[in-house]
Amino acid sequence: MSWIACTLDDICDKVDGHIQTGPFGSQLHQSDYSKVGTPVVMPKDIVNGTISEEGIARVSEEHVLRLSRHKVRTGDILFSRRGDVGRCAYISPKEQGWLCGTGCLRVTVDAKVADSKFIFYYLQQASAIDWIEKHAIGATMLNLNTGILATVPIMLPSLPTQRRIASILSAYDDLIENNRRQIKLLEEAAQRLYREWFVELRFPGHESVKVVDGVPEGWKKQKLVDIADVQYGFAFDGKCFNNQRSGTPIIRIRNIPDGTTSDYTTESADSRYVVHNGEIVVGMDGEFHINTWNGEDAYLVQRTCCIRPTDKALNGWLLYAIYEPIKFYEKTVVGSTVAHLGKKHVDTIELLTSPSSLYKPFVALYKKRQVLLNQNRKLSKARDHLLPKLMSREMEV
């Protein structure tokens, strides 16, 4: 059966959702959020096609009832309405009943016409993202609305073909998700270990170690800049940025949560701005994301930094040691519109350092984590290589 040309609007559920904007600011205020309750998905929570729960906002049942028309269902596709407008996520059964938040658009596909997972993958193509970005409005920050999203062109095969293509691509994502679960367990283990040994000071042999002013004998309080080199990003010309893989990969704030990038620049910079796989990167605007870089060598862009311990044995430990002080600044630093982490803040960060033997477990956990992250990068690359071939009918299914 031949593929037919249509638009996203043509395949949306007209009765039960269609393409819908999340609640406006007047419907959901900052004071409505709480530490517990139903998650509210914001653009920042859309990471690599999925929803990240790290730091996600929540609301009580009272607000869920009031905003019930914004509840998401399995198979919905959420888009960021501002900024990185090509970014979208597929709603899994786990997120059923969560709320589509301010700054997002919700797409509900008509299951009688199209397979929602196929449509999600179709919209992940570079050509689809490029179309959305070119038709979005705004000079300084791109904005997406329901009208623009409704006109996204789609080439649609038969439902059985859609499902076969979605199944092939989902197999890669299932492996990636399994690795993510293992990564989360490793991170939780490292966080527990750091808190027990370096915050509660219940490290091996602590019973026989004298502690003076919160510092165990043989330990030190040291400035971050005394045990690590902090490299700040280069002010590249944004006109040279592209997502056609032309030039050199770049690390922007939006790339840090996932640890990989599809952004490139044709501009060149000094080698000190090159970040290597496994190095620690931090976003310095808005939410100060912290991660290890999991992609290939890439340039560091302005408003990001790379933290390189002078002793590489500290790398695994340092990833967790800097978390609390940097997140403290995220909550307390105030910018004109968003919080900015500056050199003056980084220079004040002080850490409690220990004898080298206590870093070894962190090295082991870090290495295991990095292996899984690199596996996911390779799986993503293989999936993304197949994606355009399947969608262009170069590869028959």
Image (spheres, helix red, strand yellow):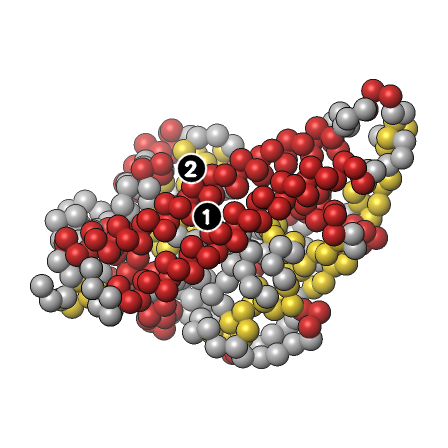
Measured as percent of width and height from the top left, residue 396 is found at: 20, 64
Quarter holding the C terminus is bottom left
Query: What's the amino acid at mark 1?
Result: Asp
Residue 159: assigned label: none
Q: Can residue 332 be seen in this view?
A: no
In this view, the residue farthest toward the left is 1
Give the alpha-carbon distance from disc 1 to disc 2, as whole Å. 10 Å
Residue labelled with disc 1: 45
Query: What's the amino acid at mark 2?
Result: Pro
Q: Residue at x 57, y 37 (%)?
A: 186
Measured as percent of width and height from the top left, residue 94 is found at: 36, 36
In this view, the residue farthest toward the top is 207
- For this view, does 253 lie left or right of residue 101? right
Residue labelled with disc 2: 39
Measured as percent of width and height from the top left, residue 304 is found at: 63, 61
Local packing at callout 1 (Cα closer than 10 Å; few below 14, some 14-19, many 20+) is many
- For this view, does 331 lie left or right of residue 101? right
Q: Residue 95 versus residue 158: which sits nearer the camera?
A: 158
Q: Residue 18 versus residue 321: which sits nearer the camera?
A: 321
Q: Quick one: SS at disc 1?
A: helix
Q: Quick one: SS at disc 2?
A: strand
Measured as percent of width and height from the top left, residue 177 is found at: 42, 44
Which mark is first along the chain, 2 or 1?
A: 2
Q: Which residue is drawn at 67% across and 59% down?
A: 306
Q: Residue at x 60, y 59 (%)?
A: 277
